[in-house]
Amino acid sequence: MSEFLASIHPVAVCFIVCAAKIIEITIQSLKTCMMVKGQRLKAAGLGFLECTIWGLVISTIIGTLGDNLFLLAFYCVGYATGLFLGSTLEGKIALGTSSLQLIANDENTGIITEYLKENSRGYTVFEGKGSTDKMNMIFIVLPRRDTASVAKQIRKICKNNVFVVVDDVNKYSGGYGMLK
């Protein structure tokens, strides 16, 4: 490998190291999210790939790091870019499950539950008392990738007269349409 890299222009080596580091750290970010979400087998596969890339990158720069500060700079840029790209990609993939807790008056509770029924979403309504009036809490568990659009639609149909809390869900079982 070192003979191959020695035959390439040093600037090209900097770009290769940067690109490899971006890929490695993006994989690392996704691997970490998969571990947290309980997808251990996928995380292990990504970990193997990440380690392979890391070994190639580190073996490329370890001998020349003191002589080539541009290589270090490209390594650092690749690391930072990989973190950004990995977290952005994970946000798009939206692994896991979320819960929505909505607090609304009776009128908006009816509007929300009708919307949820029309869209085949399970929910549970709890009656309660707010600081000034009777309120209801609607509890919904749904795939994380759907959370933002469902919350946005609910706020829209209730003209923003609903209190919304979003949480990540680690484990659950049973429920309407949510077997795991």
Image: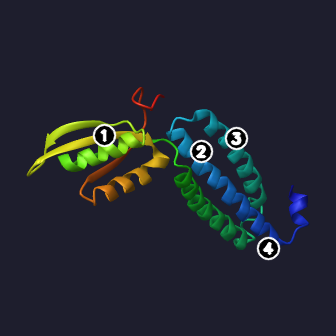
Residue marked by disc 3: 48
- Which callout, 1 or 2, points at the residue further toward the start of the chain? 2
The total of numbered circles placed on residues is 4
Question: Does residue 114 appear to the left or right of 20 in the view shown?
Answer: left
Residue marked by disc 1: 139
Rendered image: mark on residue 31: 2
Q: For the residue marked with disc 1, what is the amino acid?
A: Phe
- Which callout, 4 or 3, points at the residue further toward the start of the chain? 4
Q: Could you say where residue 21 lies in the image, as x and y percent from the top left?
A: 68, 59
Q: Secondary structure at mark 1?
A: strand
Quick one: quadrant of the N terminus?
A: bottom right
Q: Residues within 10 Å of mark 2 (few under 14, many from 20)?
A: many
Q: For the residue marked with disc 2, what is the amino acid?
A: Lys
Disc 4 from disc 3: Cα separation = 28 Å
Residue occupying the point 71% across, 73% down: 70
Q: Nearer the viewer, residue 24 or 64?
A: 24
Q: Quadrant of residue 69?
A: bottom right
Residue marked by disc 4: 11
Q: Could you say where residue 14 lies in the image, as x and y percent from the top left?
A: 76, 68
Disc 2 from disc 3: Cα separation = 10 Å
Q: For the residue marked with disc 4, what is the amino acid?
A: Val
